[in-house]
Image (cartoon, rainbow, N blue to C red):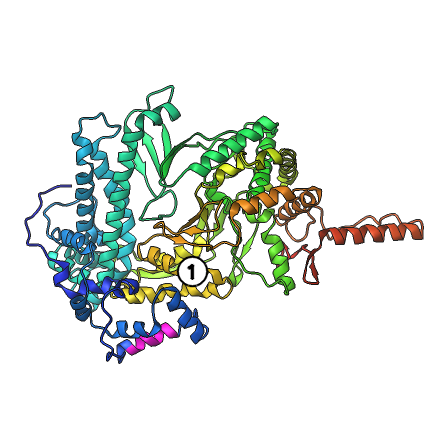
C-alpha cells in the first residue's frame, strides 16, 4: 500500500436510510411492527406475489409453514414489503455493523492505494484498507508484547489483501457489469475501443462520490463486502494469535527434528467457509515445512487416530499410518500430508487393501461424505483428511409402503453411504459424474451450467452459462507416472474390507465397553450434512445478482427455495431459519451434533433439540453389534457391484463381453439336481431380499439407459 490516510468527514450510515434496506426479514421483525393500515400496493404488491408464486410453496399451507419456521407471520411480510426504508429507519435501532460501515465510508477518498488493485475491485478498495487496519489493530498488543513471534507482522498485511481481494472480486462483478452497460448506453464512457471504455469505467470507481452512490444504490452489496472483510480480518488475526500461543507445542509435535523457520505464507480457502467466514488454512514456513489449521474441534480426528492404533494392535494387515493431530479448544492443527506415488504394484495392492479396511471402519461408524476431496494418496497409504462426518444420521423419511423407498433405504443403509466406493451420480439433462473417494478420476464436466464471463476487461462483458471441466486428482495412487485404474482393484478392496470387518467383530465387546474407546466419542463434535453442499454453493454463487442487492428482503425470497426439500424431508423445516442466516453471512450453513445426544447445534451454537430420532452413538453401537456373516456378504456384494458400474454395458463385471460366445453349462443329471438348484436360488433370493410391510425388493445391476451399469 502507498499514500497516507485522508481526513474526510465521516458519512454515518444511520443518517442515510438506504443502509436500512440491507436488514434481513428476521432483523426487521424485532423492531416495532409497521402500521396496521399499510397494505402492499403497486410494486410492493408485485413483490408479495412473487413470494407466493415460488415453486417451493406448493400450496397456502406450505407458504404459511415456511414463515412459521422462520418465526414470521406471512401477513407481516406484506407489510414489510410495503414499508419505505425511511420508515424502517425511523422505528428501528441501528445495528452494530453500521459503525463498521461508517469506518469504511470514511475511507472512500483515502489517499492510500493498494498495489495490484484495479478494474472492478477498485470499488472494494476501501473495504480492503479497513480490513488491513482492523487486523493491525487487533494484533498490535501481541506485536508490542516483545515476545518472539513465529511470523512477521507485515505478513498479516499481505495475507489479508491477497485473501480478501479474491473473496470480494466475485461479489462486485455482476453489479458493476450492469452499471458499466448502463453507463455505456448513456454515452458516459470515453474511449475508442471496448478495452478503453472498460478502463474509463474502472477509473470512475476511484472517485468517492461514485463509490458512495453505488454502495447506496446496492446497500446489500455494501453489507456483504463489509461482512466478508470483518470475517476475514477476524479469521486471520485469530489464526496468528493461536499460532503464537501454540508455537512451542507445534514445534514439538510436528517439527521435533528441525526448526521450520518463520511463517512465510498462509493459504486460506482450503474448503468452504463456515461459522463467520472461517475456513481451513495451510501454513508454509521458511524451511518449506507445512501444517494444516482447522478452525473446529479436532476431538473426533484425534479419537479416530486412536481407533487406527487399536486396529494396528489387533493385527490389521497392512497396518495403517497415523496422522499427527494437536487438539485445542474449538480448533487444532494437523499434519500436512504430501502426495506421493507408489513404487511397486505391491504398494498399489496394499493401498487398496487399506482403503477397503477404511471402508469397513467407516461403515461401522456410519460415516459419510468421503468423496475425492477428503482423501489423499500418500504412496501406499490412503489418508483421510477430513473426519467431520462420522456418526452421521440418515435424515430422509421413507414410506415403508412403497417398494422404491424400501430399495432406496437399503442402499442408503449400505456401505455405499460412505461415498467412498465408485458411484455415478446422475443429474437432469443426462449429466453424470463420479466424485467418490475411489472412483472419481480424470477430467469431468460439472452437472450444472456455471456462470463465466465472456469479453472480460471490455465494456462488452457478458455472463454466459456453461458446463465447466473440473479435475479430480490426488486421491488415487500413481505408479510409473500414471494414475492407477481403480476398475481392477475390487478384489483388494473386498479383501481389506473383510479383514477389518472381521477384526471389529472379534473385538466388539472391547470397543463397546462402557469405558471403551467408542464411548469417548460421546461428546466429540461431528458434522451433520443436512443437505448437499452443492445446493448451498449454488445459492451463494447466484446471490450476487444485482436484483438481490438493493433490498435484503429479495435475498430472503431467493433463499426461500430451500423449502423445496421439506416436502420430502419434513425435519429440515427446523433448520431453514439457521440456513438462511448463514447464507446471508456468505457462509455454507453447517450443523453439528454430539454422538451421545439426539440434538443438533447450528453455526452459532444454538440448540436444535431432539432433531435426531436416535443419537449417533446408539446407531453405531447397534450396527457394530449386528455385524455378522450375512451382513458381510451383503456389503461385499455392494462393493463388487459398485466396481461393476465402472465397466461399460457391453461387459460383465468380470470384464468379459456379454455379446460373445458363451459355453453352454453342463446339463443337470436328474430331477434332484433341478430341485437342488431351485432351492439354492430360492435361498439366495431369501437371503438378499429387503423386506418391510409385506413388500420385498432386491437390489441388482442394470443398464442406466446408456452403456453404463448402475444399481437399481
Residue 87 location, quadrant: bottom left
Mark 1 lies on residue: 574
| Residue at x 52%, y 38% (from the top left corner) | 519
- Residue 693 position in % (x across, y down): 68, 62
Q: Quadrant of the N terminus?
A: top left
Q: Left of 315 or right of it: where is 540?
A: left
Numbered circles on residues, count? 1
Mark 1 surroundings within 10 Å by alpha-carbon count, few (fewer than 14), some (14 through 19), many (20 or more):
some
In this image, 467 relative to 490: left or right?
Answer: left
Can residue 480 be seen from the camera position used here? no
How would you classify the magenta stretch by its main secondary structure?
Answer: helix
Q: Position of residue 566 (x, y in %)?
A: 47, 64
Relative to 34, is 416 above or below?
Answer: above
Q: Position of residue 577 (x, y in %)?
A: 37, 60
**Residue 504 appears left or right of 587:** right
Residue at x-position 29% and y-position 49%: 167
Quarter of the image where the C terminus is located: bottom right
Residue at 43% x, 53% y: name it: 533
Please say whether residue 631 is one of the residues in the magenta stretch: no
- In front: 128, or 450? 128
x and y, in percent, of residue 592 in the image: 42, 48
The answer to which of 486 and 275 lies nearer the viewer is: 275
Residue at disc 1, secondary structure: helix
Give above or below for 553 relative to 315.
below
Magenta stretch in the rendered image: 45-52
The answer to whether one can see residue 234 in this image is yes
Taking the view exactly as shown, the residue that stands out farthest to the top is 257
User: Which residue appears farthest toward the front when viewing the image?
Assistant: 514
Q: Report which quarter residue 490 is drawn in.
A: top right
Amino acid at each position: 500500500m502507498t499514500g497516507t490516510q485522508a481526513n474526510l468527514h465521516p458519512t454515518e450510515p444511520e443518517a442515510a436510510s438506504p443502509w436500512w434496506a440491507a436488514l434481513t426479514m428476521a432483523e426487521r421483525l424485532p423492531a416495532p411492527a409497521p402500521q396496521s393500515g399499510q397494505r402492499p400496493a403497486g410494486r410492493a404488491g408485485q413483490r408479495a406475489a412473487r413470494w407466493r408464486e415460488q415453486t417451493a410453496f406448493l400450496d397456502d399451507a406450505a407458504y404459511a409453514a415456511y414463515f412459521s419456521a422462520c418465526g414470521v407471520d406471512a401477513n407481516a411480510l406484506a407489510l414489510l414489503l410495503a414499508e419505505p426504508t425511511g420508515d424502517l429507519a425511523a422505528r428501528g435501532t441501528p445495528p452494530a455493523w453500521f459503525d463498521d460501515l461508517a469506518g469504511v465510508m470514511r475511507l472512500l477518498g483515502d489517499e492510500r492505494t493498494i498495489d495490484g488493485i484495479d478494474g472492478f475491485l477498485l470499488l472494494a478498495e476501501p473495504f480492503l484498507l479497513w480490513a488491513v487496519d482492523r487486523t493491525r489493530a487487533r494484533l498490535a498488543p501481541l506485536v508490542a508484547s516483545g515476545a518472539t513471534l513465529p511470523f512477521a507482522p507485515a505478513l498479516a498485511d499481505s495475507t489479508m489483501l491477497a485473501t480478501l481481494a479474491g473473496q470480494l472480486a466475485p461479489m462486485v462483478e455482476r453489479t458493476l457489469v450492469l452499471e458499466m452497460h448502463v453507463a455505456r448506453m448513456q454515452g458516459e464512457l470515453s474511449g475508442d475501443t471496448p478495452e478503453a471504455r472498460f478502463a474509463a469505467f474502472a477509473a470512475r470507481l476511484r472517485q468517492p462520490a461514485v463509490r458512495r452512490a453505488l454502495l447506496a444504490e446496492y446497500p446489500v452489496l455494501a453489507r456483504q463486502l463489509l461482512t466478508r472483510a470483518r470475517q476475514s480480518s477476524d479469521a486471520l488475526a485469530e489464526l496468528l494469535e493461536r499460532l503464537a500461543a501454540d508455537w512451542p507445542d507445534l514445534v514439538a509435535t510436528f517439527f521435533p527434528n528441525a526448526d521450520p523457520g518463520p511463517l512465510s505464507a498462509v493459504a486460506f480457502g482450503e474448503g468452504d467457509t463456515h461459522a463467520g467466514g472461517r475456513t481451513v488454512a495451510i501454513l508454509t514456513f521458511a524451511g518449506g515445512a507445512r501444517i494444516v489449521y482447522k478452525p473446529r474441534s479436532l476431538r473426533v480426528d484425534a479419537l479416530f487416530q486412536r481407533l487406527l492404533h487399536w486396529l494396528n494392535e489387533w493385527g490389521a494387515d497392512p497396518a495403517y499410518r497415523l496422522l499427527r493431530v494437536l487438539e485445542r479448544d474449538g480448533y487444532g492443527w494437523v499434519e500436512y500430508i504430501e502426495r506421493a506415488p507408489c513404487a511397486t504394484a505391491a504398494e498399489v495392492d496394499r493401498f487398496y487393501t487399506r482403503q477397503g479396511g477404511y471402508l469397513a471402519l467407516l461403515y461401522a461408524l456410519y460415516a459419510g461424505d468421503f468423496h475425492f476431496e477428503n482423501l489423499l494418496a500418500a504412496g501406499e497409504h490412503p489418508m483421510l483428511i477430513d473426519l467431520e462426518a462420522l456418526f452421521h444420521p440418515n435424515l430422509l423419511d421413507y414410506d415403508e409402503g412403497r417398494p422404491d423407498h424400501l430399495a432406496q433405504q437399503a442402499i442408503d443403509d449400505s456401505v455405499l453411504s460412505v461415498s467412498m466406493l465408485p458411484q455415478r451420480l446422475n443429474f437432469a439433462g443426462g449429466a453424470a459424474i463420479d466424485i467418490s473417494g475411489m472412483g472419481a478420476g480424470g477430467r469431468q464436466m460439472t452437472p450444472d451450467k456455471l456462470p463465466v464471463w465472456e469479453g472480460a476487461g471490455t465494456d462488452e462483458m457478458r455472463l454466459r452459462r456453461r458446463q465447466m471441466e473440473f479435475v479430480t486428482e490426488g486421491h488415487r495412487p500413481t505408479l510409473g507416472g500414471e494414475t492407477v485404474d481403480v476398475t481392477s482393484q475390487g478384489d483388494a478392496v473386498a479383501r481389506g474390507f473383510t479383514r477389518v470387518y472381521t477384526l471389529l467383530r472379534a473385538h466388539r465387546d472391547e470397543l463397546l465397553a462402557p469405558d471403551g474407546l467408542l464411548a469417548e466419542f460421546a461428546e466429540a463434535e461431528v458434522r451433520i450434512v443436512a443437505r448437499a453442499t452443492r445446493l448451498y454453493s449454488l445459492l451463494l454463487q447466484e446471490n450476487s445478482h444485482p436484483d438481490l442487492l438493493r433490498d435484503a428482503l429479495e435475498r430472503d425470497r431467493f433463499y426461500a427455495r430451500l423449502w423445496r426439500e421439506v416436502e420430502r424431508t419434513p425435519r429440515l423445516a427446523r433448520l431453514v431459519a439457521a440456513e438462511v442466516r448463514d447464507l446471508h453471512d456468505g457462509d455454507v450453513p453447517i450443523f453439528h451434533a454430539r454422538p451421545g445426544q439426539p440434538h443438533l447445534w447450528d453455526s452459532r451454537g444454538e440448540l436444535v433439540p431432539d432433531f435426531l430420532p436416535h443419537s449417533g452413538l446408539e446407531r453405531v453401537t447397534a450396527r457394530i453389534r449386528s455385524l455378522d456373516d450375512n451382513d458381510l456378504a451383503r456389503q461385499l456384494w455392494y462393493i463388487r457391484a459398485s466396481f461393476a458400474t465402472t465397466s461399460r454395458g457391453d461387459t460383465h463385471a468380470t470384464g468379459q463381453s456379454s455379446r460373445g460366445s458363451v459355453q453352454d453349462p453342463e446339463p443337470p443329471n436328474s430331477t434332484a439336481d433341478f430341485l437342488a438348484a431351485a432351492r439354492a436360488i430360492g435361498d439366495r433370493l431369501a437371503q438378499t431380499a429387503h423386506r418391510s410391510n409385506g413388500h420385498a425388493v432386491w437390489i441388482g445391476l442394470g443398464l442406466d439407459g446408456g452403456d453404463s451399469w448402475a444399481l437399481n
